[in-house]
Image (cartoon, rainbow, N blue to C red):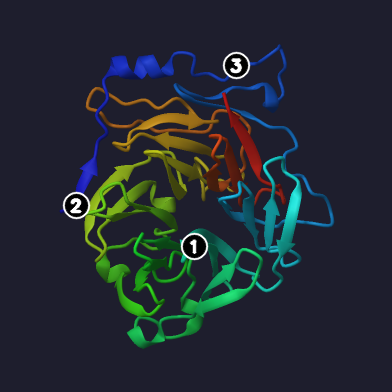
Amino acid sequence: MLTSRTNQMTRRTFLGLASGAIAVPVFGKSDSASLILGQGDFRYRVVPSWGQLGDETPVENCHGIVCDREGHIILLTDQIKNNVIIYDAAGKLVHKWGTTFPGAHGLSLVMENGREVLYITDLKRHKVFKTSTSGEILNEWGWPQSTGKYEKEDEYRPSWTLHHPDGSFFILDGYGKDYISQHDTEGKFVKIFGGKEGGIAHWGPHGGVMDTRKMDDVTMLVAMSDKQHLLRLDLVGNKRETIAMPGGNPRQIRLHKDHFFVAHLGDHWPADPHCRGFISVLDAELRVISNIAGSPPLYDDKGILQTMCHQEEIFQHPHDLVVDPQENLYVAQFNSSRTYPIKLERV
């Protein structure tokens, strides 16, 4: 049964969150590094010049970003001189590889049989690749021709993969026909659902996360991009609930210690290609409790989240993010004039 989340919160609770919510300068400086971003317990400051690598290691669009067990930050870009860039925590280059992913988009880091592997979706090659963290291609999956859902390969443009703890995974065709296909622990195709006939809006299922907090009821929480909401699905495609994100444009969701972090591409995208964007932090009940570089979250007397917007000129189209063990954030951005990831330290 599909429900609509109203996110109950009293006005008094909001006022408590909003106090001190405006970004304030530190030590009298006015640049971005001096601003405190966000509200409540989730406030951050930009780390200047983190990850700037120069002409020898260029980026185009920074699409996916993850953190491995050694604390390295792994970035995916569709720049074929170096599709995968691996940083240390200080922002120095550790390794780079990849010249064959012109449509590099989604990046997932998964532990399989004691080792970390990457899943990369490629919009232009119409495939999903499984690789080692050093660049060896271990497996690949093309368009699901046998399902009869596609007439030709270029209709299939997978945007991200979501991974169940048992080793099975789901592929979101977020830029194709909006289907979600399931593969078992061996990578074999199981089933396909969603799409237009499944009530999934076009160009909606962009990214997401497996909500594994209840192991007897694992669900998918999907970022529905231009639709301005999150969508919870069970593992056979039934809609459980929608979570409104008015004014946002959720592109990816990351779960960290019972909080959800949502990257919003822009508050007026796609109508305004020059809009900014922000990061939302949601609590365990999926209530927004902080907007990093965005307006303080406001719920009306009925518990309905009011329209959000960017507030500080920090981001340009956040596309993905990751939280490191020290609670710092790293944000990868799309269509942002070839900018490297932005690191924000928690304060």
The residue under label 1 is which amino acid type? Gly
Q: Residue at x 15, y 54 (%)?
A: 1
At which x and y percent is residue 9? 27, 25
Single out the mark in the foreground, 3 or 1.
Answer: 1
- Compared with residue 210, is residue 15 higher up or lower down, i.e. above or below? above
* Left or right of 76 in this view: 157: left
SS state under label 2:
loop
The residue under label 2 is which amino acid type? Leu
Asked where in the image residue 104 lies, by quadrant, the reply is bottom right
Q: Residue furthest front?
A: 114
The residue under label 3 is which amino acid type? Val
Residue that mark 1 sits on: 114
At which x and y percent is residue 248? 44, 41
Q: Residue at x 48, y 33 (%)?
A: 309
Residue that mark 3 sits on: 24
Cα gap from disc 3 to disc 1, whole angstroms: 45 Å
- Compared with residue 128, is residue 77 higher up or lower down, i.e. above or below? above
Residue 275 visible to an observer of this rendering: no
Q: Are marks 1 and 2 in contact (CB under 8 Å)?
A: no
Q: Nearer the viewer, residue 22 or 127?
A: 127
Single out the mark in the foreground, 1 or 2.
Answer: 1
Quadrant of image for the C terminus: top right
For mark 3, does the 10 Å Cα neighbourhood hold few (<14), some (14 to 19), or many (20 or more) residues? some
For mark 1, does the 10 Å Cα neighbourhood hold few (<14), some (14 to 19), or many (20 or more) residues? few
Residue that mark 2 sits on: 2
